[in-house]
Amino acid sequence: MNILKVCGVALIAAFSIGILKIYKSEFVLPVSVVASVVIFGAALGLIAPISDYLGELSSIGGFSIYFSAIMKALGIGIVADTAASHCRDVGQASLASKVEFAAKILILSLALPIIKEICAAALEVVK
């Protein structure tokens, strides 16, 4: 799916949501979620070749641990941002901030082994 199709889906969803807010507000969230899933799926299809190429590069350089953590952190960030945006759309800003906080904690937990390796390497250099 190219960017024109993605933008078309987004514009159709936005127009539909605008009309639904007036007449059938209970359908706003489901339409928004479905449109987001379609766009997210299209983006995942576009990112697969990039991810494969970066995976090859990381295995050549011996950085597969770092690459894995970075890709997981990126995925967590994208999913959390999407969920938080939907929470804000329905007026749940507090819930959105909790989702973002949880994502930050998860990303920090992914970074801890890398930080440990960097500290160990720094101690080796100092010795």
Image (cartoon, helix red, strand yellow):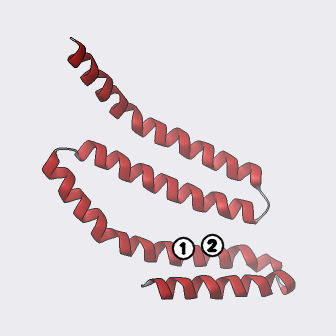
Based on the displayed image, in which of its 4 quarters is residue 75 positioned? bottom left
Q: How many C-alpha atoms fall within 10 Å of the one at disc 2: few (<14), some, or many (≥20)?
A: some
- Choose top left, top right, bottom left or bottom right for residue 14: bottom right
Looking at the rendered image, the quarter that the C terminus falls into is top left
Pick out the residue farthest to the right: 22
- Label annotation for residue 53: none
Q: Nearer the viewer, residue 127 or 5?
A: 127
Q: Where is residue 4 in the image (x, y as percent from the top left)?
A: 49, 88
Looking at the image, which is closer to me, 40 or 11? 11
Location of residue 51 with respect to 76 vertically, above or below: below
Residue at 59% x, 62% y is 82
- Residue at image position (30%, 43%) is 66
Specify the amino acid type for callout 2: Val
Query: Dot 2: what SS?
Result: helix
46 w.r.t. 87: above or below: below
Q: What residue type is labelled 1?
A: Val
Q: What element carries label 1?
A: helix
The correct choice, above or below, for 47 with respect to 31 in the image is: above
Count of marks placed on residues:
2
Is 70 on the left-hand or right-hand side of 96?
left
The residue lying at 69 percent from left, 53 percent from top is: 96
Q: Residue 109: where, in percent of width, then height?
A: 45, 36
Residue topped by disc 2 = 33
Whether pointer 1 and pointer 2 mark residues with C-beta atoms closer than 8 Å, the reply is yes
Residue 1 in the image: x percent, y percent? 42, 84
Question: Could you give the CA–CA distance between mark 1 and mark 2, rounded to whole angstroms?
Answer: 6 Å
| Residue at the (51%, 83%) spot, across then down | 6
Where's residue 80, x and y in %? 56, 55
Crowding around mark 1 (Cα neighbors within 10 Å: few <14, some 14 to 19, many 20+) is few
Q: For residue 37, which numbered disc appears in the image? A: 1
